[in-house]
Amino acid sequence: MKHAVDVLITCDIDPTPEANIDDKRIALRRCADLFNKYSIKSTFYTVANNAHEYSAILNDLTAEGHEIGCHGLTHSDDEEFSTMPLETQTKILKEATEKIKKVIGQAPVSFRGPRVKTSAATQEVLEDLAYLSDSSVCPQRIDFISSNLINPHWITAPRLPYRPNIKNAFKKGDRNLWVIPVSAIILPFISGMLYFFGYRFMRLFFNILAFESRLTGKPIVYLLHPAEFAPMTKAVHHKTSLKAILARGFYFRSKLKLRHTCDTRFKMTEKFLSYISQFNGVSFYTAHSYIEKIENV
């Protein structure tokens, strides 16, 4: 049986202190306009403490059919969902959920941890707060641009969406919550790979994932940051402790972002999304609409 090719284009609205807020607002709107041009409905995971800075745009995105998800409270180096105790995560996620709800008028139901981190404790709190999905797992990703570095749990995590185990976020279980994995084949299917390796490589990468999708039904989940389309004009001095450096994945991701101008990154992204949108059998989903689809099958 051949499956359709389900694609989730997902965006993390990080603080990105290297860019000023006006430029980041323009970049976010520019990103959404690009998606609208190709009839892509996306999930925008926003950091709760920064959501008010984008309130008008976030409400416009909701009206346009996009989804606003939660990307943690502060995205600081200390907000480590892989290791924080349950009590701390409960406090943080309740506050983050309320802050986003205050901005967009409804509670988010989709989550991605800062630096793509999660745990059984995270998922317990998400389930209690009526979230439907966690997209903080990247199965079979082994690289050094991830803030997880080499996460041994990712190596054996299921590639298809799954309900996680109550004791292990990276194994199948019976939670009501779903995990929607970010796509990877050793390397992650993210915008940094497009900027570093180029369009032809990413087209091949997508074709391989599409082949897998047709065989297994696994959705293709792509991750980008709208702030990549903003100029990085501000010098930022990061903490130099080993813990801080590791939390940023050696900050190699910033090097990828700065490899091209913001306009070049935008043009590369448009070319790639145009290719995906014209690919035979592709359908675009938000995290929420994808969960609705698989629960109604």
Image (cartoon, rainbow, N blue to C red):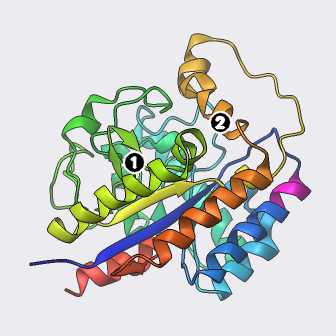
Q: Find disc 2 in the rendering and name its residue.
A: 76
- Specify the quadrant that holds the N terminus: bottom left
Measuring from the top left, give residue 293's x and y in whole percent: 30, 83
Amino acid type, mark 2 = Ser
Measuring from the top left, give residue 231's x and y in whole percent: 84, 47
- Residue 240 picture quarter: top right
How packed mark 2 is, by other alpha carbons closer than 10 Å (few <14, some 14-19, many 20 or more), is: some
- Which of the pair 209/247 is nearer the observer? 209
Along the horizontal axis of the image, is 295 left or right of 27? Answer: left
Measuring from the top left, give residue 252's x and y in whole percent: 60, 27
Q: Tell me, for residue 122, which label it has, or none.
A: 1
Q: Residue at x 41, y 36 (%)?
A: 82
Along the horizontal axis of the image, is 247 left or right of 175? Answer: right
How packed mark 1 is, by other alpha carbons closer than 10 Å (few <14, some 14-19, many 20 or more), is: many
User: In the image, which residues are magenta?
Assistant: 21-25
Helix, strand or loop at disc 1?
helix
Amino acid type, mark 1 = Thr
- Which of the pair 58/36 is nearer the observer? 36
Q: Residue at x 22, y 43 (%)?
A: 168
Q: Is residue 48 visible?
A: yes
- Which of the pair 189/251 is nearer the observer? 189
- Which of the pair 107/238 is nearer the observer? 238
**Residue 167 belongs to magenta span:** no
Measuring from the top left, give residue 103's x and y in whole percent: 72, 72
Select label 1 or label 2 by which is in front. Answer: 2
Q: Which mark sits nearer the N-terminus, 1 or 2?
A: 2
Q: Is residue 105 visible?
A: no
Q: Residue at x 58, y 22 (%)?
A: 250
Helix, strand or loop at disc 2?
loop
Along the horizontal axis of the image, is 213 left or right of 126? Answer: left
Q: Is residue 1 above or below residue 77?
A: below
